[in-house]
Amino acid sequence: MTTNACFYVLNQEHGPDTTVPAHFDLAAKIALEQFRSGERVFVYIDDIALAHQFDEHLWQFEADSFVPHNLQGEGPKGGAPVEIGVTPPVGRRTVLINLSMALPDFIRRFNQVFDFVPVEAVQKQAARERFKQLRQLGAVLSTQEISQ
């Protein structure tokens, strides 16, 4: 199975709500798009505090754009259409939204990966490393500039 990976190159640090990183805001929009397309999405993130922050952002996301989601271990059996976690997902998920600084070792389980190149230097360098690793794994890579 070939993995397609799209990296979004951001040009600002925060989304419209200045308390939320720009890549969290964009990740929420992608999660909504993928949910509406019928995909089962896994949002991988570095730690539980950030997972809670992203979870909270999804709850406060646009009122007419509810994204059914849960943190790992919560919600219905099998999880909601969008699951947020810090360890590999248990069930079958086709789409990965990577909010982690590292490329997860379970990356090949997904058909589609969305990743981000934030403005901040350390995060930008980590994104370059993830891009290189995905290229070495044979993923089909694309980039998209985001200007907000």
Image (cartoon, rainbow, N blue to C red):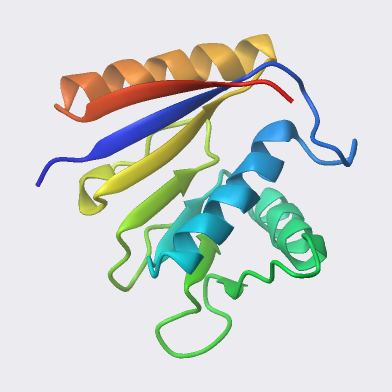
Q: Give the image quarter of residue 107.
A: top left
Q: Vertically, is 87 above or below 59?
A: above
Q: Vertically, is 102 above or below 33?
A: above
Residue at horizontal 52 percent and vertical 30 percent from the top = 101
Is residue 106 visible to us here?
no
Is residue 140 visible to us here?
yes
Q: Give the image quarter of residue 134.
A: top left
Residue at horizontal 21 percent and vertical 28 percent from the top = 140
On-image quarter of the C terminus? top right
Residue at horizontal 52 percent and vertical 70 percent from the top = 72
5 or 77: which is nearer to us? 5
Q: Position of residue 57 (x, y in %)?
A: 77, 56
Q: Position of residue 70 (x, y in %)?
A: 59, 73
Residue at horizontal 24 percent and vertical 50 percent from the top = 111
Q: Position of residue 131 (x, y in %)?
A: 36, 20
Q: Vertically, is 17 above or below 10?
A: below
Q: Give the image quarter of residue 15.
A: top right
Q: Vertically, is 108 above or below 36?
A: above
69 or 123: which is nearer to us? 69
Horizontally, residue 90 falls left or right of residue 120, namely left
Q: Position of residue 12 (x, y in %)?
A: 75, 19
